[in-house]
Image: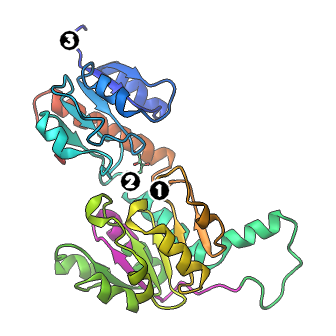
Amino acid sequence: LNNRPRVLVTRRWPQTVEAELAERFDTVFNVEDRPMSAEDFRDALGKFDAILPTVTDGLGSEAMDVSEARTRILANYGVGFSHIDTDAAKKLGIAVTNTPDVLSECTADLAMTLMLMVARRAGEGERELRAGQWTGWRPTHLVGAKVSGKVLGIVGFGRIGQAMAQRAHFGFGMKILVQNRSRVAQDVLDRYNAVQVDTIEDLLPQCDFVSLHCPGGAANRHLINSHRLDLMKPGAFLINTARGEVIDEHALAQALMFDCIGGAALDVFDGEPKVAPILLDCDNLVMLPHLGSATEETRTAMGMRVLDNLVDFFEGRTPGDQVA
Ligand code: 8YV
């Protein structure tokens, strides 16, 4: 069909989703599978009815600096969309959608993985063993911190924060404290026996573990700074599966090096895939390359969710996941 919407997919997706997309739309895949530049985007905005970006595609003011666009929807593959300038999209009359829900469980699973890894020194242990430096069992070898029964602070109590609370409360008997920009319904807190505190300053001194599940973007840039790291208990752990910019990484490196906190575990980085060299020098830091949603099931479900949003949009309905 010649009137099928022209769709640009900026990265390679799971095969089953690519096949579905190609079936329904006049689909162009970025076969090079690498992040698109601002210039690529300005060009694409004139050529495609829909663009399907990911977190690696910076759709800031420079990339959106066109006077008019053929593109009518940016259907993001991922729940976080702080890489998209939604005001610029609005001015050009472009809708923006994301993929919530389908990745909450896997992202919370990964946050649990990080929490356990850093508390139990799993990364250090594996590095030691692979380097042939394991000299044998001893009572004081790589002794970490107990997770079960401890206090977990959750910053941002949306879908992923709640999935984290579910795992920590029911699986590990942890006590849950919550900080969120709006008041959380009491019945939602009660599900996890959680208590909401007013500010992050109230939360930090009370927690053995703090896990970040808030959005990125300007509003939360360096939410965790040196002052707030100082408020954490000595020996406490910080986990980030949200967005790199939420933490001032230099302040974190200082806190880790001077043992102001027990450790940290990061899945996301400010300026990723570049990692601030100072972080590489911190032993009590676990780092993963943005794997939060990286399971076959979830990456496929994310793609199907984008597909649903596109079909709704081009059939004249408001997509369920429209965020701007
Ligand atoms: C994705 C994520 O891997 O959904 C998000 O916000 O960070 C990850 O699930 C990534 O954003 C893909 O665009």
Residue 182 vs 142, above or below: the answer is above
Mark 3 lies on residue: 3
Asked if residue 304 is among those painted magenta in the image, a careful observer would answer no
Q: Are marks 1 and 2 in contact (CB under 8 Å)?
A: yes
Residue plotted at (25% across, 27% down): 50
Instruction: Look at the numbered disc 3 and give the secondary structure of its residue.
Output: loop
Horizontal arrangement in the rendering, residue 277 relative to residue 37 (left or right): right
Give the mark nearest the N terminus, 1 or 2.
Answer: 2
Instruction: Look at the numbered disc 1 and give the secondary structure of its residue.
Output: loop
Label 2 lies in ligand 1 vicinity (Cβ under 8 Å)? yes
Residue 249 vs 295, above or below: the answer is below
Which of the numbered marks, if any, corresponds to residue 103?
2
**For discs 1 and 2, the disc positioned in front in the rendered view:** 1
- The amino acid pointed to by label 3 is Asn
Could you tell me residue 255's position as x and y percent?
53, 80
Give the mark nearest the N terminus, 1 or 3.
Answer: 3
Label 1 lies in ligand 1 vicinity (Cβ under 8 Å)? yes
Residue plotted at (48% across, 81% down): 172
Asked if residue 154 is among those painted magenta in the image, a careful observer would answer yes
Which of the numbered marks, if any, corresponds to residue 292?
1
State how far apart marks 3 and 2 are (Cα). Answer: 33 Å
- The amino acid pointed to by label 2 is Leu
Instruction: Look at the numbered disc 2 and give the secondary structure of its residue.
Output: loop
State how far apart marks 1 and 3 are (Cα). Answer: 37 Å
> Could you tell me if residue 318 is visible in this image?
no
Magenta extent? 143-164
> Could you tell me if residue 172 is visible in this image?
yes
Residue plotted at (51% across, 26% down): 32
Residue 17 vs 153, above or below: the answer is above
Question: Dot 3, crowdedness within 10 Å: few (<14), some or many (≥20)?
Answer: few
Question: Dot 1, crowdedness within 10 Å: few (<14), some or many (≥20)?
Answer: many
Horizontal arrangement in the rendering, residue 38 relative to residue 314 (left or right): right
